[in-house]
Image (cartoon, rainbow, N blue to C red):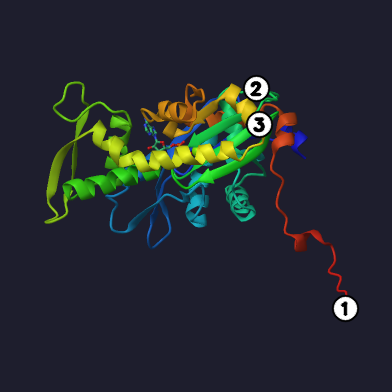
């Protein structure tokens, strides 16, 4: 079936992330890059806004609107919202009507059959004629520039929003994959917790993310010291609910997110420890490919490199690696056929006739 892809008049490669959704179209490149968010009318179910527009409403939505981030922890947690979001994104990416469409979607290697079925279902409901799923870790490695046929094992660490996905790739196949429930969102949460306990002030999700992106995880001294990096953060004083502003330094952010970083490093270390001796030897030579938005955190690559004593390579655009890699697969149906995750059909649907043996 897959070798018929040329008969589809539109083809898309989709990275359905917890934080960002990217769509790649052959010949056109990345055609959509939006936050995975949708605003839905509470009572009518009508879609009010999707992507960046919906994300802007987060934390300040109108009383009758609800902003959903339908992908949590790397899987769909709100099927209805996800399907609506995907439909809107696909429509936007195609920019008009389309009849026969073929879509390749990246899913975490550690996703369950049920989770994969829900992704396929959402894509079909969003009018995809044919859907193939591929392992995100493999797609990220290809997107980062790893040649498909490279037979040496490579370790791919994708630090996204909800999950950190760790995969070992060799010769275009996934040797092992695991997933940690800590990534970018957990870093934001750690910053919120720190500000709450240290300054008795609560800050919003988006403010915490901004602080993380601006200050990162490198030590540069406290506010007032030479070379220190500090920014002003505005939130709500817990005692009386009024607005309050404080200056916070990169050293404080580093301290706040330390436990989360340690957990990510420990997860990567475990993946290496669990691999076979030859694989470990390959990884020692080839190092780590670091992708996902977390790769952009100041200090993340350095931290992994230092603690694991492995070379860490970050592609030019780590946020787009999965979509670009899935796009490369679209261009090569033979490779795609080799790596596409087959559909999980329940055993009872596979049998033609129910035979009862008493
Ligand atoms: P997902 O695949 O789960 O949607 P992404 O790979 O798109 O996730 O990465 C999103 C995460 O990356 C978010 O937590 C975001 O805060 C983080 N991120 C993006 N840019 C930066 C940056 N410059 N510094 C630190 N973190 C960043
Ligand atoms: Mg991702």
Q: Residue furthest bottom?
A: 358
The answer to whether the beta carbon of the residue marked 2 is less than 8 Å from any atom of ligand 2 is no
Compared with 173, 109 (above or below) is below
* Mark before the other along the chain sequence, 1 or 2: 2
**Dot in front, 2 or 3:** 3
Q: Secondary structure at mark 3?
A: helix
Residue 212 x %, y %: 31, 35
Residue 144 x %, y %: 55, 25
Residue 12 is at least partly visible in this image: no
> Residue 173 lies in what quarter of the image?
top right
> Residue 273 lies in what quarter of the image?
top right
* Residue under numbered circle 1: 358
Compared with 84, 1 (above or below) is above
* Mark before the other along the chain sequence, 1 or 3: 3
* Residue under numbered circle 2: 147
Are the residues at dot 1 and dot 3 in contact (C-beta closer than 8 Å)? no
Q: Secondary structure at mark 2?
A: loop
**Number of other residues with Cα within 10 Å of mark 3, as a class: few under 14, some 14 to 19, many 20 or more:** many
Residue 301 is at least partly visible in this image: yes
* Residue under numbered circle 3: 279
Q: Residue at x 30, y 35 (%)?
A: 254
Q: Residue at x 42, y 34 (%)?
A: 294
Instruction: Tell me the CA gap for discs 1 and 3.
Output: 49 Å
Nearest the viewer among 69 and 269 is: 269
Are the residues at dot 2 and dot 3 in contact (C-beta closer than 8 Å)? no
> Residue 177 lies in what quarter of the image?
top right
């Amino acid at each position: 079936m897959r070798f018929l892809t040329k008969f589809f008049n539109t083809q898309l490669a989709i990275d359905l992330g917890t934080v960002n959704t990217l769509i790649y179209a052959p010949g056109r490149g990345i055609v959509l890059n939006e936050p995975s968010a949708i605003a839905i009318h509470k009572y009518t179910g009508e879609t009010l806004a999707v992507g960046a527009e919906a994300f802007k409403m987060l934390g300040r939505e109108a009383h009758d609107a609800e902003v959903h981030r339908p992908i949590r922890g790397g899987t769909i947690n709100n099927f209805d919202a996800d399907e609506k979001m995907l439909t809107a994104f696909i429509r936007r990416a195609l920019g008009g009507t389309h009849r026969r469409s073929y879509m390749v979607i990246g899913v975490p290697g550690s996703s369950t059959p049920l989770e994969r079925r829900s992704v396929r279902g959402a894509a079909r409901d969003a009018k995809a004629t044919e859907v193939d799923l591929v392992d995100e870790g493999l797609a990220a490695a290809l997107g980062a520039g790893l040649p498909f046929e490279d037979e040496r094992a490579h370790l791919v660490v994708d630090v996204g929003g909800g999950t950190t996905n760790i995969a070992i790739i060799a010769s275009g196949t996934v040797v092992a994959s695991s997933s940690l429930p800590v990534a970018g969102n957990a870093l934001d949460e750690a910053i919120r917790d720190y500000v709450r306990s240290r300054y008795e002030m609560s800050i919003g999700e988006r403010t915490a993310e901004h602080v993380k992106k601006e200050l990162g995880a490198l030590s540069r001294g406290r506010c007032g010291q030479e070379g220190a990096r500090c920014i002003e953060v505005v939130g709500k004083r817990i005692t009386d609910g009024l607005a309050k502003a404080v200056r916070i330094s990169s050293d404080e952010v580093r301290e706040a997110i330390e436990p989360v970083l340690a957990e990510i490093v420990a997860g990567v270390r475990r993946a290496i420890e669990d691999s076979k001796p030859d694989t470990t030897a390959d990884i020692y030579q080839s190092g780590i490919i670091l992708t996902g938005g977390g790769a952009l955190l100041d200090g993340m690559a350095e931290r992994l490199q230092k603690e694991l004593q492995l070379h860490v390579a970050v592609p030019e655009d780590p946020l787009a690696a999965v979509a670009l890699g899935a796009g490369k697969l679209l261009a090569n149906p033979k490779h795609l056929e080799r790596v596409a995750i087959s559909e999980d059909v329940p055993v009872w649907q596979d049998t033609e006739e129910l035979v009862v043996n008493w």
